[in-house]
Image (cartoon, coloured by chain):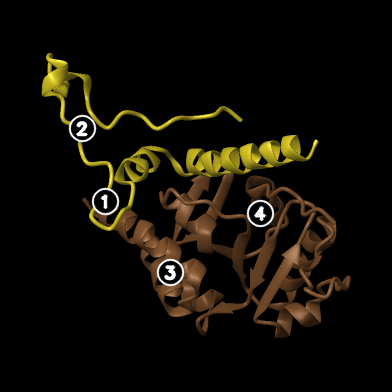
Chain colours: A yellow, B brown
Amino acid sequence: MESRRPTPCVRASEVPSSPEAVEPSEAYSEDGVDVSLIRWMLELGPKERLEAAQDMIDTVWMLREAAEA
Amino acid sequence: MRQQKPRYFQLLQLLSSHDVDFIVVGGVAAILEGAPITTLDLDIVYERSGENLERLMEVLRTVKASYRDPAGRHIVPTVDRLATNRMNLLKTDLGPLDVIASISGADYEDLLESTRTRQVAELRLQVLELAKVIETKELANRDKDRAVLPVLRKTLELKAQ
């Protein structure tokens, strides 16, 4: 399965020209939830969401097998 | 013995191809609804008619299902067990599968009105709505449920925006 990464939450047109002016938007809500990951998942369809979860499992399994080798 | 790697899609494909009537609940339902969480098992609530239990048993035989018995005994599911047990926590060739007759007193028929049909590739799945997943986890109130609730609640909030 193709691996996917979270898409940026800020549009290119919204990025200030001066790097000093950049203030990252809050990725975490007040209760510590990573909102950027939720927004990323909500951009995906159900099939892609399931694939993302499966990718995670596959990666963990691969790392576990490598550690045991 | 090492546990098999979960393969959600293949399990769902097998259940669908055998015309099993079931609802996807728990963590995989939350994932399908957009929550960025992980889970190792697929939880389903099944319809308990005799015909459906036979279809479900056929799938369970195909994936060599047995109970995740803490004592390590090899106990296989049967139609009788599926008809009477509320929770059937199984290991299969395609990973852990929790086959559940009812959650918090609600069975397949009760939960059906709180589902939505999700198209996942060629599969049409009945998936428990996120609000109902949250409700069931609040009622279960186990550590693992409480741990994931903030993410589920925030996902529901963002979906509504």
Expressed as whole percent of the image width and height from the top left, the position of residue A47 reads 51, 41
Q: On residue A24, which mark appears?
A: 2
Q: Disc 4 to disc 3, how far (Cα)?
A: 31 Å
Expressed as whole percent of the image width and height from the top left, the position of residue B139 reads 43, 79
Residue topped by disc 1: B158
- Toward the viewer: B44 or B154? B154
Q: Are marks 4 and 1 on the same chain?
A: yes
Q: Chain of mark 1?
A: B
Residue furthest out toward the right:
B74
Q: Are marks 2 and 4 on the same chain?
A: no
Q: Disc 2 to disc 4, how far (Cα)?
A: 45 Å
**Residue at image point 64% right, 52% down:** B12
**Residue at image point 60% right, 65% down:** B44
Q: Are marks 1 and 3 on the same chain?
A: yes
Look at label 1 and name its amino acid.
Answer: Leu
Residues marked 2 and 1 touching at CB (< 8 Å): no
Residue topped by disc 4: B16
Dot 1 falls on a residue whose secondary structure is helix
Look at label 2 and name its amino acid.
Answer: Pro
Q: Disc 1 to disc 3, how far (Cα)?
A: 19 Å
